[in-house]
Image (spheres, rainbow, N blue to C red):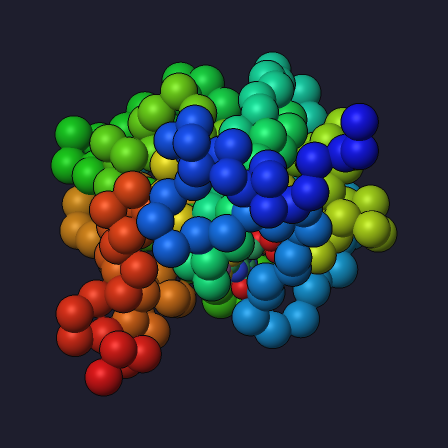
Amino acid sequence: MPPLSRRQKEREMRAAGRLPNGQSLTEKFPVLTYGPTPGFDPATWDLRVFGAVTQERRWTWREFQQLPTARMTVDIHCVTRWSKFDTEWEGVLFRDFLQLLELKAEARFVIAHCEFGYSANLPLAVMDDEDVMLATKYNGRWLHEPELMDHGGPLRTVVPKRYFWKSAKFLRALEFSPVDKPGFWEQGGYHNDGDFWKEERFQRRGFFSR
Ligand SMILES: Nc1nc2c(c(=O)[nH]1)N[C@H]1C(S)=C(S)[C@@H](COP(=O)(O)O)O[C@H]1N2
Ligand SMILES: [Mo]
């Protein structure tokens, strides 16, 4: 039997209820970065946690690598209309990471801050889900390997239940905030919540939809 064509696989995913409206299946792994890919120096890299926590913290690359990791296979959906199925990620589950912190009661939003000023915001209630990950590996390989660096090395969030712009590459800090702070694309007119099952692509009054 010949291998399934892309369109056959797409039909199967649609039939299985895994292809959200307006999406098409890709077998490639497109790179979508606004701006350049940063370098990675394990000696100076750190991940900071600040905002509504009793104690602000910082992990060096070496320290971050000591944290327990998990693996997951999830589908990803980009607002530019491609969906990629059964992608495999490894890293620290956000839920496990939260155990290391003491959040203040007022913490309600999580803002992911990345190299070069990219950011993405989500409610803590959305981030505190079993499948949200601080990912260091894709398909068993480190994100900071040269071939994968464009995909967010050495660390990115993966938030499988939202459009992929919410999965912040080149992550350097997590801010816990009592108030929402729209991120890079959210300020540019993308939807604040970004649920692909509801096709929350753009804000009604967003920059791009005018
Ligand atoms: N730091 C950073 N993270 C980012 C982006 C970006 O431009 N910079 N683009 C977002 C968008 S729009 C998408 S679709 C995904 C793309 O991830 P990929 O390049 O691994 O496919 O990353 C998201 N995270
Ligand atoms: Mo995107």
- Ligand 1 lies in which image quarter? bottom right
Tell me residue 48's x, y (percent): 50, 43
The N terminus: image quadrant: top right
At 59% from the left and 65% from the top, the residue drawn is 33
Tell me residue 122's x, y (percent): 30, 45
Q: Residue furthest front?
A: 1
Q: Is residue 13 above or below residue 113?
A: above
Tell me residue 163's x, y (percent): 40, 49
At 26% from the left and 78% from the top, the residue drawn is 209
Q: In front: 149, or 173?
A: 149
At 52% from the left and 32% from the top, the residue drawn is 12
At 69% from the left and 42% from the top, the residue drawn is 5
Q: Is residue 54 visible?
A: no
Q: Is residue 24 visible?
A: yes
Rendered image quadrant of residue 53: top left
**Total number of numbered discs in the rendering:** 0
Q: Is residue 182 above or below residue 158?
A: below
Q: Is residue 135 above or below residue 31?
A: above
Q: In front: 16, or 197?
A: 16
Tell me residue 154's x, y (percent): 69, 44
Q: Residue furthest right?
A: 146
